[in-house]
Amino acid sequence: MSGQSTLSPALQAAQELLYKKRAEARAERIRRGLPVDLHLQQSAVSTEPSAAEADLTAVYEQLPEHLGWGSAAATKAMRQALARRSGGAAEERGRRGEEGKRRGERMVVTSREGEAAAENRSASVSLNDATVKVYPALAIGMLKQEYAPQARVYYLLRHLDHVGQGWLAVDDIREQLTAQASLLRIANRKTSPTNAWRSLRGILNDGEGVFWERDDYGRLWLYGAAKIAVTLACGRLTGYPVHVPVKQFLGGIKRVRAHLYATFHTGREKDPTKHGPAHRPISQATLRELTGVPEATQRRYNKVAKVRRYKHYATGRKFDPEQHKEALYERWGNAFKFTDYKGKQGAVGASYLAHRLPNSYTTKTLQASKGRQEKINKHIDLVTNVGEEAAQAREQLALSHKLSAGQEMSKTSTMTKQSTDEGHPAATGSKPEASHDQNPAYSLQLTAYSSQSVCAPSSLTQPTRGNGAGVDRLFYHDGKQARRAHQR
DNA sequence: CAATCTCCGTCCTAGAGGAT
DNA sequence: ATCCTCTAGGACGGAGATTG
């Protein structure tokens, strides 16, 4: 874990420049009559707005709703502040009495006595539905580098920073995450607030420079996804972000880890048919490679995060002893004879060549829109790949993608040309098609997918009994049809 | 700082059915 | 009887977190 380190001369120079620019910006805001140092205005603030503020509010209120201020975050913050200033604030005043006097005073949840309870009450209404956007690549990076406690705090702070201003007062954080009555308390109920704060201090210290940084005014500035991704060296953000319920960050650390892990499954890929979740098989060994989570732990996490597993089988041509031998030794090590007792595939009792594929996984957690993901990736590219060499590497990468796409087409059309140890497609960048069990293309592609050793060639598995008895989904493939089958 | 608790990695077994 | 492969689940011990 990284702690405080001495600053390099370059960084010091950059910081000085930053302070200078902040001072200039502050002077400019004062000149234009805009509010400054909102965070420092904790004490009593005049109930009535100043003349300049009133004029400004009037101007804002006349602006159409769709107008922004050149920044999504700024727009959001301004709109919310305006809402508080006008109707929202008036209602709040009526409802909370004394509380109303502090309108516009602070954008974050405050730590004052009574106020925290009020905030918690309002939070209790929304906590069940509240979610935070989590990028799976980041979540896995955090898991790999053992930053789960920091990740928990980071996402809870992201939730607390509903205004999107990017910072929170450390006192407020302490109150929200350690107070006995706080809904966002992350320690055991039995733990004394002192110990909880001791623990939180350690977490904040260990996350310094990775997830956040503190300033001299008792504020914690949260880093953005791009910066964290660069620090964790988790590469570009792939897949879809995930809406993780805030309450999942409030249990034990195991629960937090489990849900960070589960984002990998949730964000993997959308089903192009839009009829359901994608079911791309992926073996536990590959999951271990990609996420760093050992198989046994994957299963534990699956239980905790309620990740649903689906077993998969792929069938080939009609069973023939010679072809079976060939399949066993040359193509699928785990080929077996599948007897279609129900006649779902054709004639009742007909036998086919089949083999087991790795599980696929889904969760009930929803995918989020990609939103700023591309911009974040551009930032990551800028920081991690700079110069001509990187540009050349990108060109080569694009070229290899084109080539592999061409090869992919030929593979899917010929079905299991080869059994290889080339590595997992997800790891190598060639993506097998997402699937749906009513999609005829699925089994065809699934078979090609397996031939690329997602599931290492292996095993004799009988889906009608034993391992296959509890099968969730069974895919047939005869080159033309794919459909769900039922157990005998 | 020591006692206690929690979490996790490793190892082992089981299950499927055909081949050896 | 053993092996093949993949997954599931239990037992165990060590490491790290938590607690007073």
Image (cartoon, coloured by chain):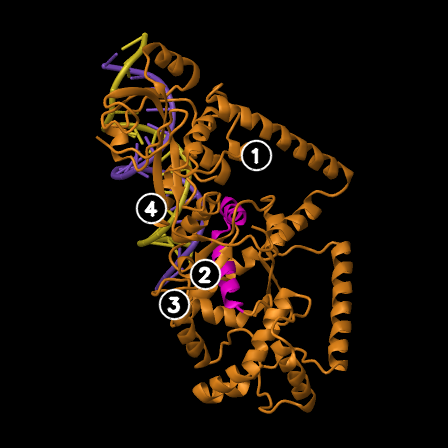
Chain colours: A orange, B yellow, C purple
- Is label 4 on the same chain as label 3? yes
Give me the residue at 43% from left, 79% from top: A118
The amino acid type found where label 2 is placed reads: Thr
Give me the residue at 52% from left, 68% from top: A162
- Is label 4 on the same chain as label 2? yes
- The x and y percentages for residue A77 are 60, 72
Work out whether mark 1 precedes mark 3 in sequence or the reverse, and give the earlier one: 3
Residue A111 shows in the view: yes
Per the model, the C-alpha gap separating discs 4 and 2 is: 21 Å
Marks counted in the figure total 4
Give me the residue at 40% from left, 75% from top: A121
Per the model, the C-alpha gap separating discs 4 and 3 is: 30 Å
- Chain at tag 1: A
Secondary structure mostly seen in magenta is helix
Task: Specify the quadrant of the image occupied by residue A41.
Answer: bottom right
Q: Which residue is mark 4?
A: A303
Relative to A335, residue A381 above or below:
below
Badge 1 marks a residue whose secondary structure is loop
Per the model, the C-alpha gap separating discs 2 and 1 is: 30 Å
Relative to A211, residue A418 above or below:
above
Q: Which residue is mark 2?
A: A131
